[in-house]
Amino acid sequence: MSSTTSTPGNGNPGKTDFDTLKNDVKALREDLAALLRDTGSVAQDQAKTYAAKGKALAEDAGDKAVEYKEAVADKVREHPLAAVGIALAAGFVLASLSRK
C-alpha cells in the first residue's frame, strides 16, 4: 500500500489520494473474495467429513437395531407367555397414563 501525502504544488493531490484509495479498496475486495473462497472450501470439507461420520453412525445404529430386534424375537420365541404378559402390562400402563 503506497502512501501519498497531498502537498500544495504537486499537481493534483486530491486525484492521487483518490487513486490510492481506489487501489486500496480494489486490493481489499480481492483479499475478501479470496478469503470467502478459502472459507467456503474449508466449510465444505468439514461438512463432507461430518456427513461421512453421520452416515457411519447411522449405519451402526441400524445394525444395532437389527441385532436388538433379532434378540427380542429370540426371547419371545423362548418365552412366549412371558412376552404376552409383558405386552399386556405395557398396554395397561400406557392405557392408564393416557386416561389422565
Image: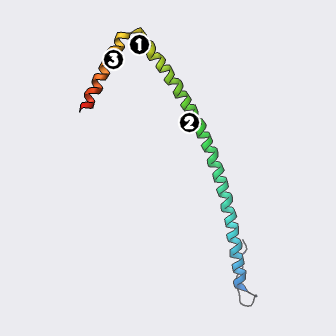
The percent position of residue 33, horizontal first and vertical second, equals 67, 60
Q: Which residue is mark 2?
A: 54
Above or below residue 17? Residue 70 is: above
Give me the C-alpha separation between circle 3 and circle 1. Answer: 10 Å
Q: Secondary structure at mark 1?
A: helix
Total marks in image: 3
Q: Are marks 2 and 1 in contact (CB under 8 Å)?
A: no
Q: Name the disc covering residue 76, or none.
A: 1
Query: Does residue 67 appear in the picture of this structure?
Result: yes
Q: How is the image coloured?
A: rainbow
The percent position of residue 90, horizontal first and vertical second, equals 32, 22
Q: Earlier in the sequence, mark 3 or mark 1?
A: 1
Give residue 79's quadrant in the image: top left
Q: Name the disc covering residue 87, or none.
A: none
Which quarter of the rendered picture does the C terminus lie within? top left
Q: Are marks 3 and 1 in contact (CB under 8 Å)?
A: no
Q: Secondary structure at mark 2?
A: helix
**Which amino acid lies under the numbered mark 2 shown in the image of this protein?**
Gly
For the point 73% across and 86% down, the residue is 12
Give me the C-alpha separation between circle 3 and circle 2. Answer: 35 Å
